[in-house]
Amino acid sequence: MLFNSLEFIIIFLPALCASLYLFRKNNRTVLLLLLSGSLAFYAYHSVNDLLLMVTSILVNFFIGQYVRNNKRVLTLAILFNVAVISYFKYSFFILQNLKAFIPGTLIFAEIALPLGISFFTFQQIAYLVDTYHGNNPEKNIVNYALLVSFFPHSIAGPLVQYKEISPQFEKVGLSVENIVIGGTIFIIGLFKKIIIADGLAPCANSVFDAASNGLIPSFAESWFGVICYTLQLYFDFSGYSDMAVGLAKIFNISFPLNFDSPYTSTSIIDFWRRWHITLSIFLRDYVYKPLGGNRDGLFMKHRNLLVTMLIGGLWHGANWTFIFWGGLHGFYLVVNHLWRAYCKKRNLEFVKKKTYLAICWFFTMFAVMVAWVVFRSQNFTVATIMYKSMFGSYGLSISPVLKGVVPNFFFFNYKGFFANQLFYFWDYLPLMLSSIFSCLFFPNIKDFLRNHVSFNGHYNTSTNTPSKRLIRLVWKPSIPYAVILSVMSVWIMLALLSHRKIEFLYFNF
């Protein structure tokens, strides 16, 4: 069951809300209903996966009772969780890489990846580590199971910390205000996913699929496809995160902000404070700091940073392309830190000028898009074709359709995989440009609902403020906003009824 499915929107969510309303005076029953609904939501995808999740929850709950100040128990607990995720997510990858070194013929099949295993495993590792360091272990199995399996975040995050969410279970319930606010956030997220991300997907897929079949996109085609994928990925995952935040808000639970306008970043450091914020915090607190953080000098700091990003890349998938992507961002971060230290030491004044910040934004986005290429590619062969095309190795060319428009343009070595392919891409230009404009100038949900939803606290690490948005819209209960949301809802429903192919990119990770 997906958030964008008619079964979820028309049947599951209304039925769950109605059940909670009927038993609203009994908090224990409300929590049990939420837990039952969450398990049913997950089981709709796969009963076998549900058994794995329930087993993981029971084992970690039991271990959590004995892990406080016990390093041996913590080590065994982490090994258990790593072993589970390694078997399902990385065993095929490991065997593939060992095949060349093992005599004889190995026959092995890829194991189906349980939905959301990375998220609910990391969630529980964080709980165990926090409990080891002094947090009280959860004694209520219902509360613990609900934290891990709560349907808004169980499949694709955001990653939440137990100490932030557990106290909120005491006030779980429905109210008109929360339904309106949460529903607004949910519709915005659904619109970002269904209308924008899925609208851009065919353009991005056609370029990368062509490269995976050995066909060579032209210079313009490759960049068009990469830009569309850059936007698709952001609106896909930030849309899901917004839906998760909105659904949790309906039940009076506040989730952390997971995206804070990352494509407005003027450095890679700032980008990772805005992109997938909860994962960045997890990697910082549970990987980077245990490795030593920045305590042991400059070299060790940068080594720890590289190792952390390599692990972050591997977390996304069992493929060398993801590891390379993580290493590339680790390299970016090291360079960024060195440059900041140099500017600070030299007390360079130009770093505060708007022109410099604009140049920094351009190079930041250039670096991010270059890294997205290998992230999206099935293998390095596809990535190599894309990189060579993007940087002119196959000739700086555009579609012959435009020869009449730009008669003085010199066409060198044109090898576009379809003669008129770029002409087809123009169908996506309005959506692409409006998406770019939205990323740069429209408020995100933190800014848009700042008078009604608070994202302060442990997770609020970005420096973005409402004053930096060109368009300073602020939501309030009013007829104009009700009309806009109604139009968005009708648009979404028409898209869902059109049976357009829909997928959530981060379900793969």
Image: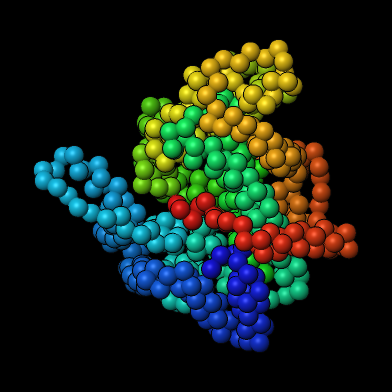
Mark yes or no: residue 303 visible. Answer: yes
Q: Does residue 280 appear to the left or right of 265 in the view shown? A: left
- Please, which colouring scheme is shown? rainbow
- Nearest to the observer: residue 230 or residue 126: 230
Q: Residue at x 40, y 47 (%)?
A: 317
Measured as percent of width and height from the top left, residue 488 is found at 76, 58
Q: Residue at x 76, y 74 (%)?
A: 176
Measured as percent of width and height from the top left, residue 323 is found at 38, 39
Q: Residue at x 62, y 84 (%)?
A: 19
Q: Residue at x 55, y 21 (%)?
A: 414
Question: Where 80 sits versus 381, above or below?
Answer: below
- Nearest to the observer: residue 132 or residue 465: 465
Measured as percent of width and height from the top left, residue 110 is found at 30, 55
- Nearest to the observer: residue 290 or residue 8: 8
Question: Where 466 sits versus 59, above or below?
Answer: above
Query: Which image quadrant is residue 184 in?
Result: bottom right
Q: Does residue 299 appear to the left or right of 255 in the view shown? A: left
Measured as percent of width and height from the top left, residue 454 is found at 69, 57
Query: Which image quadrant is residue 480 in?
Result: bottom right
**Residue found farthest to the left:** 103
Q: Does residue 372 appear to the left or right of 423 in the view shown? A: left
Mark yes or no: residue 462 visible. Answer: no
Query: Which image quadrant is residue 71 in?
Result: bottom left
